[in-house]
Image (cartoon, grey):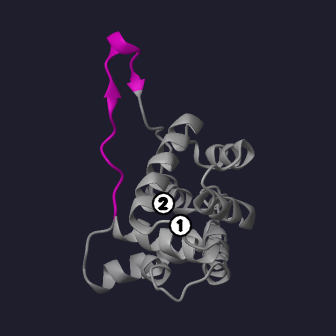
Amino acid sequence: MWSQSFKSPNVNFATANNKCQSTIGVLKFLRSDNEFDCKRNDVIEMLDKYQIDHPKIKRKKNIPLKFGGGEIQPNSFEVKDNYCITVYFRGMYMISMENRLKENQMIIINRLNEILISEEPSEDLLKIVCNTYNFDIDSLKIELNIFNRMFNQKYGNNLVFDKLESKIKYLRQN
């Protein structure tokens, strides 16, 4: 549902940014022991209601003595602690998007816009985009040259405003 709302043609940067920030806020709120206890209690109630077995700790794995021996999991692990660490907080960490959304800054979006519009973008523009998205600058230059050549063959020379709209349309088609 969340990703579908970003595919709408009426979405602008401000709307997308607000949705992302509110989602990050909810995820930060959920990353606490109190919220885990609330969610766990809800799950336990549902298990009891539908007569489903409660979760159990997975079988302990032993490492053979010739490889150092011992147990992988400590003996003092309870079911609640196990699921808190291995499922709940790991899931919250994986879907936490704060680090993944660093590219959603207006500077980066403007730089991408400038790269798409210009025939030969400056080195500074390319470096900013390459550093943000971990691209190789030479590969990006080659791809941009190929893209501009293919675009110019199809559309020719347009005005700057029309060029951006046409390039976006061309990218969506291909």
The quarter of the displayed image where residue 109 is located: bottom right
**Near-viewer residue (14 or 167):** 167
For this view, does 99 lie left or right of residue 140?
Answer: right
For this view, does 68 lie left or right of residue 97?
Answer: left
Residue 118: % across, % down: 63, 58
Please tell me the numbered disc located at residue 91.
2
Depicted 112 relative to depicted 40: above or below: above
Give the amino acid type for the residue marked by disc 2 in the picture: Gly
User: Which label's residue is closer to the chain start, 1 or 2?
Assistant: 2
Of helix, strand and loop, which mostly describes the magenta segment? loop
Secondary structure beneath dot 1 equals loop
Residue 83: % across, % down: 45, 58
Query: From this viewpoint, is residue 82 visible?
Result: no
Q: Is residue 61 magenta?
A: yes
Name the image quarter holding the N terminus.
Answer: bottom left
Which residue is denoted by mark 1 in the rendering?
157
